[in-house]
Image (spheres, rainbow, N blue to C red):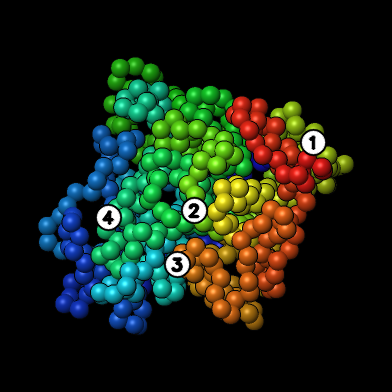
Amino acid sequence: MPSRFHWSVPCAIALAIVSACNAHNHSDSSAPRVELNSGALEGIRFGAAPNEVAFLGVPYAAPPVGELRWKPPKSVTGWSGTREATQFGAACPQLPAGWFPYPHWSEDCLFLNVWTTQLSAGPRLPVIVFFHGGSNRESYSQLTPLGPALSRMGVVVVSANYRLGPLGFLAHPALTTESEHHSSGNYGLLDQTQALNWIRENITHFGGDPSRITVMGQSSGAVDICLLMASPLARGLFQKAILESGDCQSTLNKDIRTPISYNGISGTGEGSGERLARDMGVADGLDTLRKLRSIPVDTILKAWSRDQQIQFDAIVDGWVVPEQPAKLFAEGRQPHIPVLVGSNADEATVFGQGPTTVPEYRKYLEEDAGKYADQEFLAWPVSSDTDVPAQYLKLQNQSFAYGAWSMARAMTRAREPAYLYLFTWTESGKRARLGAYHGEELAFLADSFPSDWGSSDGDEAFGKVIQTYWSDFAKTGDPNSPGLPNWPAYNARSDQVLDLGRDIRLRSIDPKLQVLEKIMAPILSETLDGKVQLSREARAY
């Protein structure tokens, strides 16, 4: 089963940043205000209605700079007077990507944004907390402007930056030794946990209900949410989860120091950190950490850009993520919460070129499935180089669907409702050839489309359906409401998924997902030395 989330994935729909929310708003008596324990905030209005307000660039942790680089985030320091929260904060350090505008970034980047229509006294609203995608190496909280559209559906919306790439996920033996938890890496996950703690403590000031928090992520953001479900540090910080095109429990995750030879994993967490340190001329020694923390961020990013074979991913570190999520979910020890989970039918059409020859394809399958590569080849066969791109694309697309299906099955075994979808809507413009590509659903959820979007009849109505499903799920744990096509919770016996496309309907699961389950089951069992459930259909395949 392919390791789906280690790429710098170019999302073809780099959504426009809402320029109105970036406008600097000088202090005035009519501006919305809140009073937090850390200090007062003055926000802005994002719409014509007086109750549509936003607070942007709100610090949720101390700047992770100097001695705080590669350490768990510390609580935010208070301020005197009123702090303007009218502009987005700096993005976290990252290399340029081809699929969105390169942002202003700073190592001081732990900011979040809040959109609400319930700032005045009244019933507290459910909360959606969005963690962006970008392979945990790029992007920023405001790239997808979900806040205005979804908050108008009766929820408070929060988005947050978190540390990325080597600043967010570098593990190193010296950092492990320094840590009281004997762990390193996963600083980005710790940032997300800190943001959730901040939200639990402060969201009532914005009209939100801290007992009704839904975490939502797309791509690597969804992977991170799955990892937070596997982390004891995040227990109780959210009550529902929405995972779009990403999971962590259907595959293996890199370990801090134990090599894994499946799912395209290369090396170990600490090994990647040591390699980058050597690239920057820092050898192991008594002052290793002092030297690493004194290196300018630009130098770190440049060294990484010259050696991008190094992947900085969330890892199994023994503390933040104590064990492989696949084992925890297989044994039903994950949080028992409702989930909404799915994938897009044509995820990989925007990922760029994969293997193009039969030997390259074979090598890819061997790195992915090891001694089970022949089984993968039989299921996605090629007879010549011309067959490779199409079969590789099918394998990638079906792998995303397998991850979502596997998550739905794991939660159903835990007796929790899982609402499984397959997004199939295809725009009619120049990207129609890409099908229902990775990230396309975000345009409908945000009601914000690129200027060259191929609009068609039904776009607006379909977007409202998607927004209603998502916001109703955040409100009640069930996406259904009067007037919408019925979306039953996943049932292993009927084994169906809701097709979210031009015709919203239930359809049978693709049989190839059972093939992937059959390949992954022995890989997980051998690696984890634990029970992995295999469906009756897969056993019979």
Mark 4 or mark 3: which comes first in sequence?
4
Look at label 4 and name its amino acid.
Answer: Glu
Per the image, the residue denoted by label 4 is 201
Distance from Cα at disc 2 to Cα at disc 4:
21 Å
From this view, report whether residue 38 is shown above or below residue 65: below
Q: Which mark is residue 375?
A: 1
Circle 2 or circle 1, nearest the eye? 2
- What residue is rendered at 48% in x and 28% in y? 256
Distance from Cα at disc 4 to Cα at disc 1:
50 Å
Secondary structure of the residue carrying numbered label 2: loop
Circle 4 or circle 3, nearest the eye? 3
Circle 4 or circle 1, nearest the eye? 4
Of residue 506 and residue 294, the one placed in the foreground of this image is 506
Per the image, the residue denoted by label 2 is 337
Distance from Cα at disc 4 to Cα at disc 3:
19 Å
On screen, residue 359 versus residue 300, left or right, reads right
- What residue is rendered at 38% in x and 51% in y? 237
Of residue 232 and residue 452, the one placed in the foreground of this image is 232
Distance from Cα at disc 3 to Cα at disc 1:
43 Å
Secondary structure of the residue carrying numbered label 4: helix
On screen, residue 248 versus residue 393, left or right, reads left
Residue 7, quarter of picture: top right
Mark 2 or mark 3: which comes first in sequence?
2
The answer to whether the residues at label 4 and label 3 have Cβ atoms under 8 Å apart is: no
- Residue 155 percent across, percent down from the top left: 40, 69
Look at label 1 and name its amino acid.
Answer: Gln
Look at label 3 and name its amino acid.
Answer: Lys
Extreme residue toward the left, this view: 80
- Residue 406 percent across, percent down from the top left: 64, 48
- Residue 117 percent across, percent down from the top left: 34, 74
- Local crowd at mark 4 within 10 Å, few (<14), some, or many (≥20)? few
Per the image, the residue denoted by label 3 is 475
